Amino acid sequence: MKVGSVYHPVYLEHDTGYHPENARRLEAIVAHLEATGLQQQLTPIEARPATVDELALVHYPRHIARIEAAALSGGGSLDADTPMSAGSYQAALYAAGGVIRAVDAVLDNTVTSAFALVRPPGHHATPGQAMGFCLFNNIAIAARYALAKLRLERVLIIDFDVHHGNGTQDAFYNDPQVLYISTHQYPHYPGSGGIGEIGAGSALGATINIPLPAGSGDDEYGQVFQRVIVPAAERFRPRLILVSAGYDAHWADELSMMQVSVTGFAGMVRTMKGLADRLTGGRLVFSLEGGYNLPALAASVKTTFDVLLDREDIDDSLGKTPHPRAAPDISPLVNKLRELHDLP
Ligand SMILES: [Zn+2]
């Protein structure tokens, strides 16, 4: 069983200065994978730039042109928290293309599963707008690519970033071929992702939002994975599972108020890998979204690879939060979700 990893130095050229989403994130991940010897166990997958036609599977042409023009003029700010530099357009093309390459590699059996270590991240980018550190929606483009170019019938996207993936939700809100499931702190940025947002038209029910209260940790995430995500995924019978992998629900991350540990992320990845083994012949592609505490991010990404490689030993030197908050009781939320989505 081979596990692929996508990385390209062009991802560092998206220069955001002292913004929390900066090139040091990927540098920390790569350094940790090398220092722990994990890198040598992975199959490298070469990134390529996405074509404009591929971007247009999700984005309006005027949005693509606007991002290209902003880079050509040297960069600037697209909104209050989405900076760009001269290198951002190229980095963003390779980010979307990197996830596409990961999808190709699992579908042509070069690898069983893969993780695209890309930036800028993507899940907040809507068809017409860059926002929340995101320029193009990498995971949504890869899902559309799998549906359109590779003729897969159904794609599942699981988004465990601590923020709601509003852009991904928007892209597939009317599309019954994509089941989008998001766990996120709620209320929190960007404000969307309420339990009642469940898709529209023939895609009614193909969006599942799991809005978690602040303070949720390993046990709460474990509960929603087992009681909501697993039965929903099994009913949907995807041909491919894509994952918006953001590690900002870690207790050390300053952009959220969750209490997940590296061990907790390992549990979620184990559950998703189990789903892939049962439903898609193991075909599972991760794409990096958030995660802003560098040691927690690097350790969590390494753990993700450890689980994909079937390694039992989880290295969680950061441990549990030293300042635990009382865990919220999420059973009523879980029961409501199971009823709303009529889960078996
Ligand atoms: Zn996030």
Image: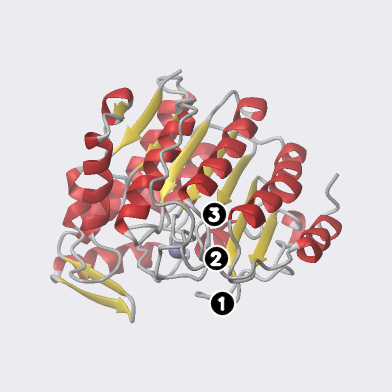
Label 2's element?
A: loop
Tell which residue pokes out farthest to the front in this image: 322
Q: Nearer the viewer, residue 220 or 339?
A: 220
Q: Is residue 195 above or below residue 38?
A: below
Does residue 125 show up?
no
Give me the disc on residue 191: 1
Residue 29 position in % (x across, y down): 28, 46
Give me the residue at 65% from left, 49% from top: 222
Q: Is residue 344 left or right of residue 115?
A: right
Does residue 79 show up?
yes
Q: Which residue is mark 3?
A: 160
How far is mark 1 from mark 2, CA to CA? 8 Å
Disc 1 and disc 2 in contact, CB within 8 angstroms: yes
How far is mark 2 from mark 3, CA to CA? 9 Å
How far is mark 1 from mark 3, CA to CA? 16 Å
Q: Which residue is mark 2?
A: 164
Label 1 Cα crowd, 10 Å radius (few <14 / some 14-19 / many 20+): few
Label 3's element?
A: loop
| Amino acid, disc 1 | Gly
